[in-house]
Amino acid sequence: MGDRWQVEVDRGVCIGSGLCVNTAPDAFALDTARQSRPKDAEPDASEEILEAAEGCPVEAIQIALLGSGEQVFPPED
């Protein structure tokens, strides 16, 4: 079985650019306030979700390994 992630969007930071939805339409959606939200907060790890997080212009998407909480994105300095 592969890794599973905990995906969160910081709604205080999200500007609703929609890049995450364009990059990973199966993983993210914009709500009525035009802010991103994960469709599944605990998805299987995927390159598409990581690309969406990396492409977010304000780094509003955080990804951690489910269970351990180890940060996947943004990378720790």
Image: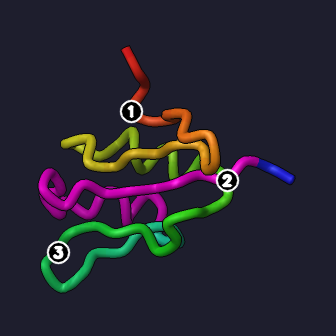
At horizontal 65% and vertical 51% (from top left) the residue drawn is 45
Q: Which residues are magenta?
A: 3-24
At horizontal 17% and vertical 74% (from top left) the residue drawn is 34
- Quadrant of the drawing holding the C terminus: top left
Disc 1 and disc 3: Cα gap in Å?
A: 22 Å
Of all residues, the one furthest to the front in this rendering is 68
The relative height of residue 70 versus residue 46 in the rendered view (above or below) is: above
The relative height of residue 59 versus residue 22 in the rendered view (above or below) is: above
Q: Earlier in the sequence, mark 1 or mark 3?
A: 3
Instruction: Evaluate whether residue 39 shows in this view.
Output: yes
**Mark sitting on residue 74:** 1
Residue at which label 2 appears: 4
Which of these two is toward me, 8 or 49? 8
Quadrant of residue 74 within the rendered picture: top left
At horizontal 25% and vertical 80% (from top left) the residue drawn is 31
Residue 19, given in percent of the width and then of the height, sits at 30, 57
Q: Secondary structure at mark 2?
A: loop
In this view, the mark in front (2 or 3): 2
Which of these two is toward me, 5 or 53? 5
Quick one: label 1, few (<14), some, or many (20+) residues within 10 Å? some
Disc 2 and disc 3: Cα gap in Å?
A: 26 Å
In this view, the mark in front (1 or 3): 1
Residue type at mark 3 is Arg
Residue at which label 3 appears: 34
